[in-house]
Amino acid sequence: MWRNCRKIGIVIIGLGVTVIVVTLLPSGFWFFAVGIFLILCGLAILKK
């Protein structure tokens, strides 16, 4: 169960990083905010 949580956290962090990279293209601030939110969620899951 814990390993599964860890995988989910890593996937969410990966999504967040991907969203931020996409944001570096002219997209807007909202994507950047979502990316940071995803990374924070992923880190929270990893710390459990």
Image: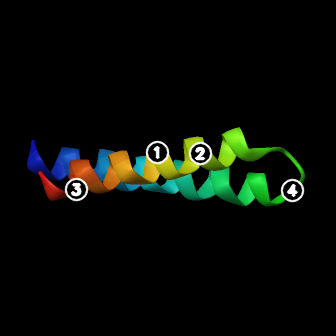
Mark toward the start of the polypeptide (3 vs 4): 4
Name the residue that disc number 4 marks. 25
Amino acid type, label 3:
Leu
Separation of residues labelled 4 and 2 (CA atoms) = 14 Å
Name the residue that disc number 1 marks. 37
**In the displayed structure image, the side of residue 37 where residue 4 appears, left or right:** left
Taking depth in this image into account, of 5 and 19 the one nearest to the observer is 19
Kindly state the secondary structure of the residue where label 1 is placed: helix
Foreground: disc 4 or disc 2: 2
Kindly state the secondary structure of the residue where label 2 is placed: helix
Mark toward the start of the polypeptide (4 vs 2): 4
Give coordinates of residue 7: x percent, y percent. 30, 51
Give coordinates of residue 27: x percent, y percent. 84, 45
Q: How is the image coloured?
A: rainbow
Quadrant housing residue 28: top right
Quadrant housing residue 41: top left
Amino acid type, label 4:
Leu
**In the displayed structure image, the side of residue 24 where residue 41 appears, left or right:** left
Kindly state the secondary structure of the residue where label 4 is placed: loop
Amino acid type, label 1:
Phe
* Picture residue at 86% right of the left edge, 56% below the top: 25
The reply to whether callout 2 and callout 1 are in contact (CB within 8 Å) is: yes
Foreground: disc 3 or disc 1: 1
Residue 46 circle label: 3
* Picture residue at 57% right of the left edge, 58% below the top: 17
Number of residues whose C-alpha sits closer than 10 Å to that of mark 1, classed few (under 14), some (14–19) or many (20 or more): some
Separation of residues labelled 3 and 4 (CA atoms) = 29 Å
Number of residues whose C-alpha sits closer than 10 Å to that of mark 2, classed few (under 14), some (14–19) or many (20 or more): some
* Picture residue at 20% right of the left edge, 45% below the top: 4
Give coordinates of residue 33: x percent, y percent. 59, 45
Name the residue that disc number 2 marks. 33
